[in-house]
């Protein structure tokens, strides 16, 4: 079973993917993480990507689709993929369908985390991600977990694109280009909408109910 976690920036896609990975032995395929890994390699492509991501714009479909294709066909992750941050426009949604079909795979669940712009702003501006274990925390909501984090506080880092101006651009891009693909999935029998403004554990429980069936 492959899953799409869908929602605006800061909706909690990465947070919930982390729990699904732990509990069900799934593989998180975050296109944001793939792109950030490319930046870390310090290549020409990485530089190009950095110049696009930093102000909050979308990387071209050609670049993202190529990175995704390399990852998607690995036998060990087949039918155990959580798509996080992909697809992000209609072209990518069509491409995903075709790529999976060519590899005898499909999407079984589409989970939409619905959250308003006011809520995501605080979430994004307070986000810290551990470079070692990939857990996502928040300096406004998780002060104890941050102090006691088992990998060490020094590994908790802010993302370069998490600033007040970029949040607005990212949210606007989501509304303009990504939200319209809800029509693409809305009538799918695997489509589920969750109120993403609820507590993390409440959302996790709802996702468990959806995935356990
Ligand atoms: P990407 O990394 O995918 O970023 P995003 O879509 O903007 O989403 P985020 O990672 O910001 O949010 P999230 O939903 O994962 O929230 P999280 O769980 O961290 O993409 C980055 C960039 O790469 C894009 O802007 C674009 O430039 C490019 N890109 C990526 N994919 C692309 C594609 N397919 N095509 C083209 N370009 C692409 O949670 C956020 C915070 O909130 C955390 O601090 C967390 O602790 C907290 N939190 C989470 N849930 C809750 C809750 N229920 N209650 C309270 N706090 C919560
Ligand atoms: Mg994320």
Image (cartoon, helix red, strand yellow):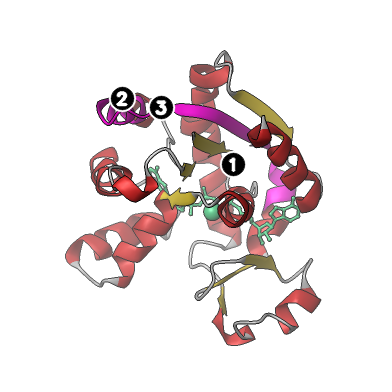
Is 144 on the left-hand or right-hand side of 190? right
Among the 4 quarters of the image, the one containing residue 68: top left
Residue 118 drawn in magenta:
yes
Residue 213 vs 23, above or below: the answer is above
Q: Does label 1 point to a residue whose CB lies under 8 Å from ligand 1?
A: yes
Q: Which residue is mark 3?
A: 106
- Counting from the top left corner in percent of width and height, residue 16 is at 64, 50
CB-based contact (under 8 Å), mark 3 and mark 2: yes
Residue 120 vs 113, above or below: the answer is below
Q: Which residue is mark 1?
A: 8
Q: Do we see residue 115 in this rendering? A: no
Q: Going from the N terminus, do you reach mark 1 or mark 3 first?
A: 1
Outermost residue toward the left in this view: 44
Residue at x-position 38% and y-position 47% = 77
Q: The residue tagged with tag 2: helix, strand or loop? A: helix
Q: Going from the N terminus, do you reach mark 3 or mark 2 first?
A: 2
Q: Which residue is mark 2?
A: 101
Within-10-Å neighbours for mark 1: few <14, some 14–19, many 20+: many
Q: Does label 2 point to a residue whose CB lies under 8 Å from ligand 1?
A: no
The C terminus: image quadrant: top right
Within-10-Å neighbours for mark 2: few <14, some 14–19, many 20+: few
Q: The residue tagged with tag 1: helix, strand or loop? A: loop
Q: Going from the N terminus, do you reach mark 1 or mark 2 first?
A: 1
Q: Is 20 or 160 nearer to us in this picture?
A: 20
C-alpha distance separating marks 1 and 2 = 26 Å
Within-10-Å neighbours for mark 3: few <14, some 14–19, many 20+: some
Span of residues in magenta: 95-120
- Counting from the top left corner in percent of width and height, residue 155 is at 55, 81
């Amino acid at each position: 079973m492959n899953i799409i976690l869908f929602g605006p920036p800061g909706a909690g896609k990465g947070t919930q993917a982390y729990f699904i990975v732990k509990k069900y032995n799934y593989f998180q395929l975050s296109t944001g993480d793939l792109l950030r890994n490319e930046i870390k390699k310090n290549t020409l492509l990485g530089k190009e990507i950095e110049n696009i991501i930093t102000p909050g714009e979308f990387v071209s479909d050609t670049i993202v689709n190529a990175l995704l294709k390399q990852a998607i066909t690995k036998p060990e992750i087949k039918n155990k993929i959580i798509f996080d941050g992909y697809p992000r426009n209609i072209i990518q949604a069509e491409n995903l369908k075709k790529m999976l079909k060519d590899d005898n795979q499909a999407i079984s669940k589409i989970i939409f985390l619905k959250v308003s712009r006011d809520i995501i702003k605080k979430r994004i501006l307070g986000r810290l991600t551990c470079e070692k274990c990939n857990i996502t925390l928040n300096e406004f909501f998780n002060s104890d977990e941050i102090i006691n984090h088992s990998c060490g506080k020094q590994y908790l880092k802010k993302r370069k694109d998490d600033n007040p101006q970029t949040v607005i651009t990212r949210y606007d891009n989501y509304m303009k280009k990504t939200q319209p693909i809800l029509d693409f999935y809305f009538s799918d029998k695997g489509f589920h909408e969750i109120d993403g403004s609820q507590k993390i554990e409440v959302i996790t429980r709802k996702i468990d109910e959806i995935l356990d069936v």
